Image (cartoon, rainbow, N blue to C red):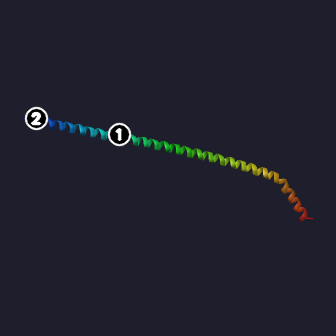
Amino acid sequence: MQGLQLLKDLAELERKLAKKLDEARQSAEQRVTHAEEEAKRILDTANTETRKMSNALKEQIAQESERYAQEAQTLGKKEGQRIRQQSDPGIERAVEYVLSEVLP
């Protein structure tokens, strides 16, 4: 009888250990699932922030490029006007000279 009780006790202990093992496995699976979800959330947040930063930098670059283009255009116009103003009297003299040489 003692051997039978020992077998029953061992079987009960094995059942309890199997139950604890199954509970531990389920708990580990839940923790892994939770960790995967958290990692995905962190990655999504990082991707969103990266896109926002990229868009902000693109906008800033576009604005600065436009400002530089406008400055260059303004400087070009000013320089063109300055050159015209300097050359206008010379052109008038050249035209007068050519006309005096061609026409009697």
Query: What is the x, y in percent for residue 98?
Result: 87, 62
Q: What residue would you read off at disc 2?
A: 5
- Image point (14%, 35%), residue name: 9
Rendered image: mark on residue 34: 1
Query: What is the x, y in percent for residue 85?
Result: 81, 51
Residue 25 lies in quadrant: top left
Q: Is residue 95 left or right of residue 46?
A: right
Query: What is the x, y in percent for residue 32?
Result: 34, 41
Q: Amino acid at mark 2?
A: Gln
User: In front: 75, or 46?
Assistant: 46
Q: Is residue 25 left or right of residue 55?
A: left
- Is 99 drawn above or below residue 42 in the view shown? below
Q: Mark 1 packing: few (<14 Cα in 10 Å), some, or many (20+)?
A: few
Q: How many marks?
A: 2
- Label 1: element kind: helix
Residue 14 lies in quadrant: top left
- Image point (49%, 42%), residue name: 49
Q: Is residue 88 left or right of residue 44?
A: right
Residue 103 lies in quadrant: bottom right
Q: Amino acid at mark 1?
A: His
- Is 102 drawn above or below residue 81 in the view shown? below
- Image point (33%, 39%), residue name: 31
Direction front: furthest residue: 3
What whole-number distance in Å separates the C-alpha atoms at marks 2 and 1? Answer: 43 Å
- Image point (41%, 41%), residue name: 41
- Locate the C terminus and report the quarter of the image it occupies: bottom right
- Label 2: element kind: helix
